[in-house]
Amino acid sequence: MNDSFDLAESSPNTQSYGAKISASSYWSELNKDQRKAVETVDGPVLVLAGAGTGKTRVLTTRLAHILDSGLAHPGETLTVTFTNKAAREMKDRVERLVRRPMEGWYLGTFHSIAARVLRKHAELVGLKSNFTILDTDDQLRLLKQGLEAHDIDEKRWPARSLGAIINRWKDRGLAPDQVTDTEGSDFANGRTLELYHDYQERLRSLNAADFGDLLMHNLTLFSNDKGVLREYQDRFRFILVDEYQDTNVSQYLWLRLLAQGHRNICCVGDDDQSIYAWRGAEVGNILRFEKDFPGAQVIRLERNYRSTSHILGAASDLIAHNRDRLGKTLWTESNEGEKVTVHGLWDGEAEARVIGEHIETERSDGQALNDIAVLVRAGHQTRPFEERFIQIGLPYRVIGVMRFYERLEIRDAIAYLRVISQEDDDLAFERIINRPKRGIGVTSLQKLHVVSRANGCSLMAAARDLTDSDELRGATRTGLANLISHFDRWRNLSAVQALPSLIQTILDDSGYLEMWRKDRSIQAPGRLENLNELIGALDEFETLDSFLEHISLVMDNAETEDGDMVNVMTLHGAKGLEFDSVYLPGWEEGLFPHQRALDEGGLHALEEERRLAYVGLTRARQRAIVSYAANRNLFGKWSSELPSRFVSELPEEHVARTSEINTTADLTEPDLDYQNIHRPDIGRRRSNWGRYAIRQRNRTYETIAVENHAPGTFQIGKRIFHQKFGYGKITDIDGNKLEVSFEKAGLKKVMGSYVEPA
């Protein structure tokens, strides 16, 4: 983290800040509600600022107004943001508005300001003023030492997982002596609290603090020394807070304590955009503002300057299904523009293809790619779009997450495949020789390199030689011999087994999947999702070599992120951004809303998922395109998917629905009950499309006609035509699924509904 902790302390400056600038310099650009939010400076104020309503302008103008009116000097104001970038931008804006540099003020992130306070009073919490602030790597190293000291197996109980638990406690302002039995954890067989105590003592002995400590020590300081608390309560005549909906418990308590002095606290936020519960954000902080600060004024900013009326109407109706919200309705004076498109597609491949085609059309019409975004719910969803964009030569950048094939677990899986294809691939072999752990450490690997260089052979060949000797210890030799045996068997299987089945076998036999299943880090579930996505992706390739060649081409794609490119990112990463066109793929039940979130958080998680959908829609200035697929390749197997409940919650008057899916079958089943849908029950989900069709039968669709061919229409050897793949001959038939050898596209599996006799 790059927080700046060297802001200069200053005593209250008695110079007059009443030399006012002309009102027209900043008042003229404010609408009525914005002006009210700026002028209402007495007492607590909550500014509910919807997406695109100009909250940043309000916040900076309010601060400039306070300073320019002589209500306070800079050192008497506290302005809190969530990022250093936002703090710098606010400083620049305010200084431009008041036309002078600001000295001695408290403006920055929660961590930077808390560190500033703590350095001044460090001795009161057992530290020295020159304490070190640990980064994540230092914190992990210290936690590992703690686990080792308590003789706890770090492989079974990772330090990173322990750190996540401790950070969650600190985000809630809980010091070790404040953690109750009910707050405890089963980590390390219930020894987490003991480890937390020792970790904090170790930090004090090193004169160090981690980021969670900065606010927690502030809370301890304010609780134990009322004089210090009063000093800051008296100092801060005005408090301004940005993105209040993203505050955690510790930040909330800190602000409440400081605001009890003058009570002139203004919090700007949007409860409908609270999407970070997974990192400690508590939406209840903004929901109970009026209770926490009796007499508070709530000012709603509802005029949107970003999106069309159709986009706002769709987003507003969607978020209205949430119960825990303060409520507001966005509106705009701009013309209606295009309706939100909701597009049903056959499968994930078709989704990537159609979105790619739409973007190409936009580009040819003069739309800048930089103003186009594809926003996905989960990181693994980027793969089909990355591959499609590379295939059609569409420049793109992945923001906030690694490109799919650059992710650690994907590189590991590909390394296994590379060794099967080419035994002499030393780089790949070295990467996975001890992943997962097989007792093959640095010393053993060095011996392999020595033999390899001496004999002029590959590491694999050297390993074969060493396993027949006594050069390696018994456990190491056994682990290496087992790995070689596995590779020999996998290589034989590669000649007869389909690629999805092959990689599944490799990941199971090697223990790689089990390693991530046992991993307790917050990244582990996402890594498993990515591996499952890889398994499904392999279904598109006939041979191992063709897949590896494809990977080489993908990895060779331009690394630069400069120039005009489509933006690909997660919905979480898109908050605060805006684009002319926004594509929102994968709106299917279990994917969005995400099943794991629902399982862990219930109704609260569902509402946060809906807020995430709201955030996605409101990123769009001109066009928002939602899509869902009827089928997904999961774990190397095709399964039927159900459109997200969010699709049915979008209002008809603001939505144009199109579909390439034939939903006329099986209309006799009862209406759909989303509460009884569980992703593992694939058999049940196969009939859900019929039930969904009932819900949609009274809606108007622009439906692409799909012909249902009578039994016997297709025969092995018969020539057919497919709109995407062209001409080909049928090589196998499984119900309405055809295996076709296409003249240009090679061997593909397609649905009979999508081909016609040639």
Image (tube, rainbow, N blue to C red):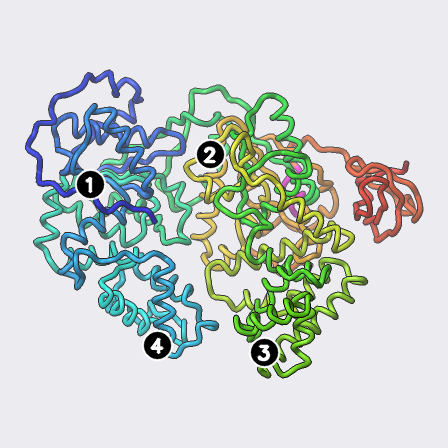
Q: For numbered disc 4, what is the local secondary structure?
A: helix
Q: For numbered disc 3, what is the local secondary structure?
A: helix
Mark 4 vs mark 3, foreground winner is 3
Q: Residue 316's quadrant in the figure?
A: top left
Residue 385 colored magenta? no
Closest to the observer: 424 or 347? 424
Q: Name which residue type carries label 1.
A: Tyr
Mark 2 vs mark 3, foreground winner is 3
Label 1 or label 2, whichever comes before in sequence order: 1
- Give me the disc on residue 618: 2
State the CA–CA distance, disc 4 to disc 3: 26 Å
Residue in view at x 37 percent, y 29 percent: 53
- Quick one: quadrant of the C terminus? top right
Q: Dot 3: few (<14), some (14–19), or many (≥20) neighbours within 10 Å?
A: some
Look at the picture and state if 327 lies above or below 69: below
Label 2 or label 3, whichever comes before in sequence order: 3
Span highlighted in magenta in the image: 691-697
Label 4 or label 1, whichever comes before in sequence order: 1
| Overall secondary structure of the magenta section | helix
Q: For numbered disc 2, what is the local secondary structure?
A: loop
Q: Name which residue type carries label 2.
A: Thr
Q: Which residue is mark 3?
A: 476
Q: Estimate the x, y position of residue 455 in percent, counting from the top left.
A: 68, 69
Is 165 on the left or on the right of 395, as rendered?
Answer: left
- Give me the disc on residue 106: 1
Q: Dot 4: few (<14), some (14–19), or many (≥20) neighbours within 10 Å?
A: few
Residue in view at x 12 percent, y 30 percent: 71
Label 2 or label 4, whichever comes before in sequence order: 4
The answer to whether residue 172 is seen in the rendering is no
